[in-house]
Amino acid sequence: MSLGLPHTFSDWFAARNWAPRAHQLDLLAQDQAGQHTLLIAPTGAGKTLAGFLPSLVELAAQPDRPRRLHTLYVSPLKALAVDVERNLMTPIGEMNLPIRVETRTGDTPTSKRQRQRLDPPDILLTTPEQVALFAGMPDAGQMFAGLSRIIIDEAHALAPTKRGDLLALGLAALQRMAPQLRRTGLSATVADEAALAQWVAPQTGPQSNLARIVRGPQGLAPDISMLLSDERVPWAGHTGRHAMAEVYAAIQATQMALVFVNTRFQAELAFQELWKINDANLPIALHHGSLDVSQRRKVEQAMAQGRLRAIVCTSTLDLGIDWGNVDLVIQMGAPKGSSRLIQRIGRSNHRLDDVSRAILVPTNRFEMLECQAAQEAVLGGHLDGPVPRQGAIDILAQHIMGCSVGAAFHPDDLFAEVTSTAPYHHLSRHQFDRILGFVIDGGYALKSYDRFARLLRDEEGRLRCRNREAARAWRMNVGSIVADPVLKVRQVSANRSRRPGTPSGGSTLVGGRVVGEIEEYFVDGLSPRDTFLFAGEVWRFEGVSGTDCLVSKAADAAPKVPSWAGGKFPLSTYLAVRVRTMIATRSYWPKLHPQLQEWLQMQDYASVIPQEGEILVETFARGQRFHLACYPFEGRLAHQTLGMLLTRRLERLGREPLGFVANDYAISVWGLKDMSRVDMAALFDQDMLGDDLEEWLEESVLMKRTFRNCALIAGLIEQNQPGKQRTGRQVTFSADLIFDVLRRHQPDHILLEAARAEAGEGLMDIRRLSDCLGRIKGQIRHQRLSRISPFAVPLMLEIGKVPVNGQALENIIEEAAGDSLLQEAMGENFSGLFEAGR
């Protein structure tokens, strides 16, 4: 076949007044030369068409080919797979190509999945979880023997995660079934190109293999502005209420806008605030991961049809759904990373020759700095992203079990296959055998219990699944995403008619539609008749039935807002460095907004501005408490861990700490004894990551929670069982029992090791904290203050996670502005600051 485009395709491009782009033809040529490829191109550059072009060309040239699966497309989002199917059918239909395209996700009916196994389409669009299930199909070898290509969309979003580990193992299994298989990764934002190219390609030797990188053209520079409200930007908080009128005006002035926020909590609040001032009755919708799937699909469909003016959304809409008519992205709150901001900006004017427009809306003073740092990073082409990581132990255990469900395997063969993936390329045989031993019988401490025996070894040394029950348990619980225990939010109504089993004259709650899912711990804090905000509406809590949170519609001016545990992005390392530099470089201050300049000058007067490389530590008394505040700018996860460890050390020093609070920028510990005479160099010494950390982990609820998640993924316990789903309490109870047994009888158990590794990497950010402590050694700037500093005000407002308002808030602000110079600097706007900080 010629490396050029067949006439059918070149004519199709010409009929649309298009010309194939250089990177599309380059990828086609690389694929036809047998190369694995990674396409890096900006949003709107035709990545999806480029990825499918080799398959379409090859399939079009073989109209009489035998019916078998030719191409597998893998997306991190089910909605993206559906969107790609719609877009792919356009060229197929217009060129009248004899190509069948179908999707297969968790929502696909069982009957359709069965039919796809017997009569597969040419192109199948699916998700990582479905790829994992393929490994456990007895007929997988037959179904995938003719597979020619796999396309991995948004590869950068998958590779550094557990889902990426799961997918990498699934790809290795498919590569074994179809050695001729070629892989193509698609990505718009890549900080470490070599690492992603290594993840895409099979690793078949001691040296790293890289997929051939194909680069698209540089898109037009985005138009990024910062909305600096006429109101004073608050010193603390994340609601953005002060700027909501201007956000609404921006929506009115545009055709269609996406309003991104960082958490579901913020999404609910922002949506409610916008509707309060929606005098023009604009169609504004809400989209986040806890809403019912059907509701999210309705919103996506309405957006695709141009029936909405705005969607308030979270990261659920970060990735490449093609909505070309979105002409503005509004980022409420700091984006936490330049790559994430680029990804979100790319949703606006989803075409290469259009300028993407974005407005950043900082919700507090520190976020003003972060937004400016992110804006400069994006315009300068500086990307950030996670560092490469080792493959997760629990994911590998799940994969081993899946392989045994599909067919018997020899450990030597599976080890070679597993180490052909980038995440597990450096896995030792000893570690592999430990994980395999766990899957076989649960490990030394659990092997006497039949329920943990899952594999049997035959006379030839091959391993297979022990029974049908174990296979079914694996199929029902495949996946890498373990959310905190949730309840379905179900709308009910009171039926006053008498029913069997109900008292005369009583009422029965009749179940209705499912609105979404809410975390169990939030429901635990509700009493009957309490109201809360969810899915953009106010609901009255009626009670709990099984795994349902029963609610009815209500009217309340002050409902509670659910606080979800997930979705809190930490400040990226790259942006943290930029923010520290902006603060330390006084010659840069004139580039900042006057409110920021004023704030930094107040801090300089009341305390000090740390120099480049220094860390500021402040100690002061307030009321009956003594405070220690420090400003590492290393992100919430690292700060929470540091707060825990500082609290332990201060306890040993007799300072009687009562607690701590942390945000992305700073930490504050408070207690009953003066902390100003503590040796700060010793307090912040890097050795706290040794025994102090180990002792805290052993006592921490965090370890049990992390172990529960690892146990669910590894298959030690199940969430989903035939005909029912276990509640969060039931799962936690089972996991805690096993955790205690293993700690007592086998403290080196492989799953305890997995939990420690995951807690250190994902929940505590130990690597980043270690780098921070090394960086600040000998660079601590300690200021003993007589009152709170401007930098410390946000921390005081977060203490106890309880909103501070009224006179208490006024007192804090007055203390920060107590000197005559500070009062003069604030002048007549002091009352405005107070109102904005509420």
Image: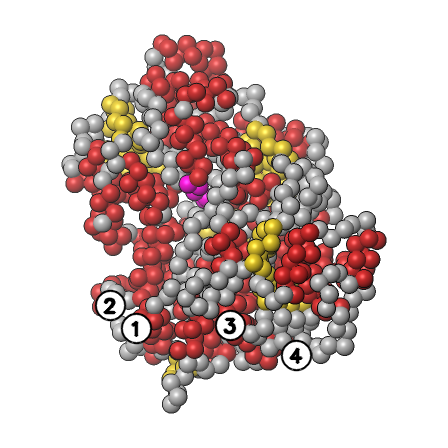
Report which quarter residue 220 is drawn in.
top right
Type of amino acid at the residue the image marks with label 4: Leu
Q: Secondary structure at mark 1?
A: loop
Left or right placement of residue 773 versus residue 794 in this view: left
**Screen quadrant of the N terminus:** bottom right
Work out how far the residue at label 3 is from the one at label 2, CA to CA, in angstroms.
32 Å
Q: Secondary structure at mark 3?
A: helix
Residue 711: percent from the left, percent from the top? 38, 64
Foreground: disc 3 or disc 1: 3
Which numbered tag is attached to residue 36? Answer: none
Up/down of 805 relative to 506, above or below: above
The residue pinned by badge 2 equals 746
The residue pinned by badge 4 equals 118
Q: Are marks 3 and 1 in contact (CB under 8 Å)?
A: no
Residue 17: percent from the left, percent from the top? 81, 49
Dot 4 alpha-carbon crowd within 10 angstroms: few under 14, some 14 to 19, many 20 or more: few
Q: Are marks 1 and 2 in contact (CB under 8 Å)?
A: yes
Q: Nearer the viewer, residue 25 or 836?
A: 25
Q: Nearer the viewer, residue 215 or 352?
A: 215
- Give the residues in magenta: 567-573
Work out how far the residue at label 1 is from the one at label 4, CA to CA, in angstroms.
39 Å
Residue 167: percent from the left, percent from the top? 51, 64
Which numbered tag is attached to residue 443? Answer: 1
The residue pinned by badge 3 equals 173
- Identify the residue shown where x is 52% and y is 75%: 176
- Identify the residue shown where x is 62% and y is 36%: 222
